Amino acid sequence: MTSMSIYTTFSVLVISLVIASRNETSTDNIALRYVVDELATPGAASLIQVRGRREVQIPSDIPKVIHQTWKTSELPATFQRWSQTWKDCLPDWEFKLHTDEENREIFAKHFPELLSMYDSYPEGIMRADVSRLAYMATDGGLYVDLDIECLRNPFDVVSQSDRFVLACEGGQQVSNAFMMGGESAKTLFRELLFKLPYESKQASPLFATGPSFMSKHLGDFVSGNWKAADGETQRLTFQNGDVTAPGVVLADATVFGMSWHANASMKKLALNRNWVTERYPNSIAFSHWTATWQGKPIPNTSSLFVITQLEQCRCMLAVLSEHDAPSSTCQADIQNRLTNCQGRGCLKILMQEYSDACV
C-alpha cells in the first residue's frame, strides 16, 4: 500500500469520525457500531496500525411510526389509556390508528392481488391480522395490539442493529400482537403476506392469519430458531439479495408480562398499572389478553390506575371481614371485580382473588 493510499484512507476515516461525532447527541435510535481508527501510523506496509479506537453509532432503519387498528377512529376508554402509554414511551414517534375502512384501502392500493382474499375473510380479526403485516410491508415501524400497554422504551432491550423484532408466545408460537420492522425488512413482511392465500381455507383465525400462520411460514424466509423460552432472546437473519437484515425474537415475559393462560383474578389485578410495574420490572410491555376478537367485553379501568397492590389486598380483606370498603377507590375496585356474581358466589370469588394475589 502506497503512502498516498494510506493517507487517503486515513482522511476518509477522520471525516467519517467528525460527521458521526456531530450526530452523537442526536436522540435518534442508535444502531450499527463501527470501530474507527483515531490514530494511525502512516507508511505501514499493510493495514493502518490502530493506537486508539472509538465506536461510531449509526441510526436504526426502523421508522418511527406506531401502528394500531380499531373498527373506527373512536377508541374505547380502556384502549385509549393503554394506547397512550406507547405515545408516552416513544414521544417522538408518529402515531397511526388505522380503521377497518383504511385497512381495506391499504390492500386496494398496495396489494390489489390480495384484495379479494381480504374481502372474503369471514371474521374481522382475520382482516385485522393481515393488515398489521401490511403496515410492516409498506411503512415499517411498530405494530402493537390495543390491549398491550408500554412499560418502557422497547429499545431498552432491542439492539439498535435489529431490523425486525418479533415475540414468542409461551416459547411455542410467533406472536403477531407485537412486531417491529425496518426498511430492510419490508420484503420479509411482504413475503409473509403472499403466503396468506395458501392458508385461506383455514377456518380458525389462528391458523389462517394469526400466530399459527406466522409460526408456520416465518421459517420459509429467515434462518435461525425463533422459539424463545423464558429469559431467552433468539437471533434471526433475513437475506434479501445482497441485503442482510438481522432480527430478534423476544421471550413472552419480556413483551407480554403475564401469560395468555393467566386466570381471571390475575387479569383483574393487572388492570392496575402500579401492580403491573411492581410485579414485572423486567418487561418492556404488558398484555391484558382481553380477547375482544372472541367477543369478550373490554375491561373497565377507570378506577384502577391509582390503587396499589397493597391497597387492593387491604381493600379485599376489609370486605371479607365484613367491614365497609375503606375508600371510594376501594369500593370501585370491589365493584369492578364482582360485576358478574350474586350472593355467596361473590364472596367465593373475592376469597379466591385475595388468596391468589395477597397470600
Image (tube, rainbow, N blue to C red):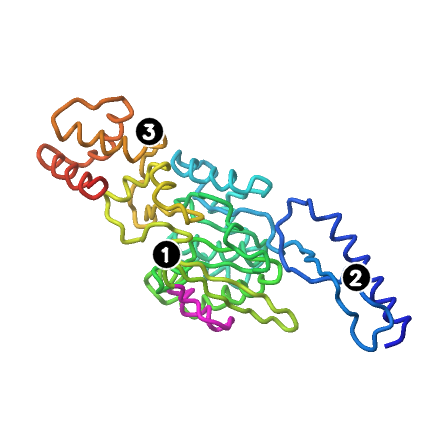
Q: Quadrant of residue 306?
A: top left
The amino acid marked with disc number 3 is Ser
Q: Quadrant of the N terminus?
A: bottom right
Looking at the image, is mark 2 or mark 1 nearer the viewer?
A: 2
Classify 10 Å Cα crowding around label 2: few (below 14), some (14-19), many (20 and above). some
Q: Secondary structure at mark 1?
A: loop
Along the viewing direction, whichever of 258 and 241 lies nearer the viewer:
258
Q: Is residue 47 left or right of residue 198?
A: right
Q: Secondary structure at mark 2?
A: strand
Looking at the image, is mark 2 or mark 3 nearer the viewer?
A: 2
Looking at the image, is mark 3 or mark 1 nearer the viewer?
A: 3
Residue 9: percent from left, percent from top = 83, 67
Residue 273: percent from left, percent from top = 37, 37
Instruction: Indicate which disc, 3 or 1, sits on the residue closer to the N terminus.
Output: 1
| Mark number displayed over residue 303 | 3
Residue 338: percent from left, percent from top = 19, 34
Q: Quadrant of the C terminus?
A: top left
The amino acid marked with disc number 2 is Leu
Q: Secondary structure at mark 3?
A: loop
Instruction: Indicate which disc, 2 or 1, sits on the residue closer to the N terminus.
Output: 2
Reading the image, the residue beneath label 2 is 39
Reading the image, the residue beneath label 1 is 122
Work out whether 201 lies above or below 343.
below
For residue 282, say whether it is visible: yes
Q: Is residue 220 left or right of residue 340?
A: right
